[in-house]
Image: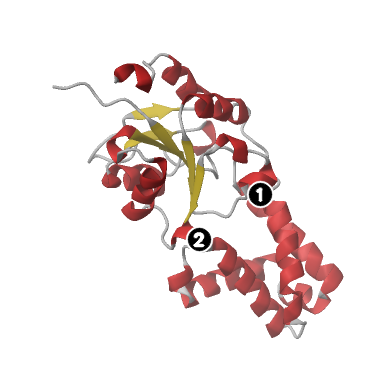
Amino acid sequence: MSPPLPIRAITLDLDDTLWPFPPIGERIERVLHDWFLQHAPRTAAQFPIPAMRRLRERVIERYPQRSHDASWLRRKGIEIALAESGSDPALADEAYAAFFSERNRVDFYADARDALARLSARLPVCALSNGNADLATIGIDSHFTHQVTARDFGRGKPDASIFLHACQLLGVAPQQVLHVGDDVEADVVGAHRAGLMTCWLHRDDARARHPTWPKREFTPRLTFPTLAALADWLDTQPHPEDAR
């Protein structure tokens, strides 16, 4: 059997890979509600946080063609909440700006920022996300050669086409690209079906949901509990330039 091809580039998930998303999700709900209390009190009264969650579900069901665009769905929900409560829909831009600012205030996993710098110093890294994090606002855009989002591309993970698009931007064949992410379906299954190598980032905060790899059809090429562990492993591997 021939040895595996060297890893020449990385595609990297963001939410729940570089930082935990649940705390962000809780904060953005509170910040948006506080904004409504100050600027659109009728909206705050009619759409407290649980009602905004239900409205978001309604928007997703109503606009399935926009399911890949988290930003559009969020803003549309804000517009509807303002209109249905008798507030000015023109306030949607300011309300969304408040939400978006808080969405991009992230608390990195302890290992993540240093590990990202190590990975990007070794290989080209492309951010590949279904979310709407802004790399420049967060302050990590210099570590990425490209960013591909479901919103910009028009389809999200686990669709194979978004992985293949990232590989094209990187100029590397899929079988020599390692996709790193936490989500079993969106990240690992999607990348595997697209022909990429896969790394399941199985952090401690996900072990209650998936104590072990849950699929029987295949296993990821790599599984690590932290991004630092992946960086450590890569340091033991021959550099791709040495494999030419």
Q: Is residue 184 visible?
A: no
> Residue 119, how many percent across, how many down?
50, 27
| Mark 1 and mark 2: Cα distance apart in space | 19 Å
Is 113 above or below relative to 129?
above
Which residue is found at the position 47% from the left and 41% from the top? Answer: 126
Q: Crowding at label 2, few (<14), some or many (≥20) Cα neighbours within 10 Å?
A: some
Question: Where does the C terminus fall, quadrant-wise?
Answer: top left
Residue 121, position as x, y percentages in the image:
53, 25
Name which of mark 1 and mark 2 comes first in the sequence.
Answer: 1
Residue 79 vertical placement versus 122 (above, below): below
- From this view, report whether residue 66 is shown above or below residue 102: below
Which residue type carries mark 1? Answer: Ile
Residue 135 visible in the picture: yes
Residue underneath mark 1: 24
The residue most toward the top is: 236
Outermost residue on the right side: it is 38
Image quadrant containing the N terminus: top left
For disc 1, the neighbor class at 10 Å (few under 14, some 14 to 19, many from 20) is: some
Q: Disc number at residue 151?
A: 2
Q: Are marks 1 and 2 in contact (CB under 8 Å)?
A: no
Residue type at tag 2 = Arg
Residue at 36% in and 15% down: 238
Nearer to me, 50 or 156: 156
Secondary structure of the residue carrying numbered label 1? helix
Residue 128, percent from left and from top: 47, 46
Q: Nearer the viewer, residue 163 or 25?
A: 163
